[in-house]
Image (spheres, coloured by chain):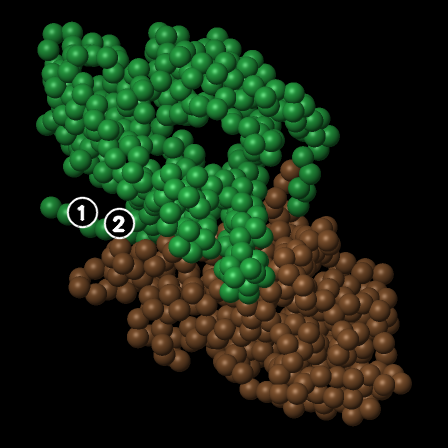
Chain colours: A brown, B green
Amino acid sequence: MEFGLTSDQTMMQESVGRTLERVSPLDAVRKGASAFDALLELGVPGILIPESAGGLGLTLLDAALVAEMLGRHVARAPFVASAVMAPIALAGTPYLKKLATGEIKAGVAVSEHASGARDGAGITAKNGKLTGMSLFALDADTADVFVVADKFGDLYVTSEATVTALTTIDATRSVAKIELDGAAAERLSGSAERMIDAGRIMLAADTLGAGQRMLEKAVAYAKERKQFGRVIGSFQAVKHMCAEMAAELEPCRALIWYAAYGFDALPEQSRRLAAHVKAHLSEVGPQVARTATEVHGGMGFTDLLGLHYWFKRIGFNRQALGGPERARHDAAVAQGWVGN
Amino acid sequence: MDLSYGPEYEAFRDEVRAFAKENGGRAPHSYFSEEMRAWQRLLISQGYAARTIPKEYGGYGAAPDILKSRIIAEEFLAAGLPMGMANQGISMLVPTLLELGTEEQKQKWIAPTLRGEVIWCQGYSEPGAGSDLASLTTRATEDGDDFVINGQKIWTSTAAQADMIFCLVRTEPDKPKHEGISYLIFSMKTPGIEVRPLVTMTGRAEFNEVFFTDVRVPKTDIVGARGQGWLVANATLKHERGMLGDPNQAGTRFKALVDMMRAETVDGGRLMDNPVWRDRLLKLQARVMAMEYHGLRLLTASLKGEDPGIARLIVKLQGCEINHLLAGFANDMLGEIGVLYGDTPHLRAHGEWQQRFMFDLGLIIGGGTAQIQKNIISERGLGMPREPKGV
């Protein structure tokens, strides 16, 4: 019985954290610097790809530990789609080797299945050609190929998408509308659900990292900032805000570990676990983000301090691949509490 | 990650499960009964209660093994059987005596306490000393070989049934508040003690007030040194905080809510089929799950002898909060039926959810209020400064 990380996992996470500290300080994030090359040196793009295909062959829990660090450093790099979701869908294909070496990067366009279709989005397959539109494709700006799902949830990979970037609140993420007009595509064998589950766990872990960092920043600020002749961190009103953030965030860590571990070890539970972890972090994250901002007072609201990068990252994570209401519905379906 | 317990422990689990199946029928129905004491003796003889208390003091004498203790708790919970007697004597006084009592005190009190033959109550809180417990004013003045006690305690559970009390009193009024307290143990039959039931918002008297008027206690009935009572008491408070935040309870209660969502209907439709109710249920499920896995994380830390730090400090706050939310949700689910109380038609689960909704609010306050917990989390967990002392 050991519910925790191995020393290898802790070391790997620390190593990713140190790298991001170096290549992804806030000033670099503001300028749109990408952490991809530094992550490539650590093998992160191939984290889930088998060693036989040039990857690290690690588990989804390892990937979640990386995601936590990316959120912590509001790092810009294709990861959730390119290094986690796409390699799951592309298992057994020659794409894996190229993803592992960084020769190509992948985007994923399945938001219609994760969040529901809006604005007429949807992709139809006919005679192996894809036609239609998908919104909110992830890791879009760097993508050489896209994994897409048709209306039935069947997966395809294509390199013939017309990509229109969408601007979101979160300047560290790239999403796009992709349009397909009789695009040539290869059919893949995996399921959209499995890939979405993995992506949801990553976004939850990203929120944990971002939220934890916001809490730390709030505590540090409260120990420094003086008003009424005292550091504001000595006022119970402020201390209790910080304690509430910690009390909500801390159990999230175990929930994420369990869901990420369960993705590989308890596949029959993984749909429910992934939906729950996504929904729960989507509730706790924004609460922490607003509280940490409030602890910083007026400064928290400014661009100068840059706290909003974390605030917005958490806000993005809440909606991507299904907001909390949608994810909870999926959790209900997964345990047979309701039909589809 | 390894969530299996391994073959040795699975064999132990089978043993406990077989015991539960065979002996479940002997489980007691009321707490203060010979039936309960017989159950307790049976459990001690099997090592399912008083497991790690040395044999010479009436325990089972097993080496501490957190996993085995957990397996026992899991299997009893699964079988719907009561664990052994859990009371303040067993969970708080016994560990204190083992740590700080004299050999004579250990010999005299531990075994009968474990067997449920001696029931204890805890005399800590006072009307003027709640969160600031160390400001307690119940006085014990020296008179020959005795202390003479005057004052009042409050929130004393089981005082009416108790044979004995472990009690904090002020023996050194001139010393700083933490250094003037002593920890005394004496009989509740001692002349000068009056117990008055304290009826709470639930309509029941789960607590009492205890009044002391010239109560004479031999000076030898002290645990630890004179003036050291604060340290002695803190050795036991940590046991109480662990007890109140048990995440297992939330899992069991959550299952009951799921059953209710399936069974209860409004306008002929099941609550489970209504997306608004279902969403609320699912929100709670995530919180219950998070605390369950958080419990596994703490368990792992204990097994490795590591201090989990802030992860441990949040348990009382979160555990009590979630239990209260669960009960509140059950009441909401029942609508107007949820406000029925007492012996009345259409009542569900004997009014237990409404009773819990109220009593669990008491638990949020008791054993260190939510606000005190937040002070502890922010000061010890996050390293934030203490509130400057008042004058």
In this image, B191 relative to A51: left or right?
Answer: left
Q: What amino acid does circle 2 point to?
A: Arg
Using the image, name the chain to which the residue with label 2 belongs. B
Q: Label 2's element?
A: loop
Q: How far across and how far down the image is residue A96, in percent?
A: 81, 70
Against A8, is A95 above or below?
below
Residue at the right extreme, as displayed = A127
The residue closer to the viewer here, A289 or B205, is B205
In this image, A215 relative to B164: left or right?
Answer: right
Q: Label 1's element?
A: loop
- Look at 84% across and 72% down and name the residue there: A188
Q: How far across and how far down the image is residue B45, in percent?
A: 56, 13
The residue tagged 2 is B386
Q: Quadrant of the N terminus of chain B?
A: top right
Q: Quadrant of residue A132?
A: bottom right
Q: Residues within 10 Å of mark 2 (few under 14, many from 20)?
A: some
Against B344, is B20 above or below?
above
- Look at 45% across and 14% down and name the residue there: B34
In this image, A291 relative to A269: left or right?
Answer: left
Number of dots carrying numbers: 2
The residue tagged 1 is B389
The residue closer to the viewer here, B134 or B59, is B59
The residue closer to the viewer here, B332 or B223, is B332
Against A11, is B4 above or below?
above
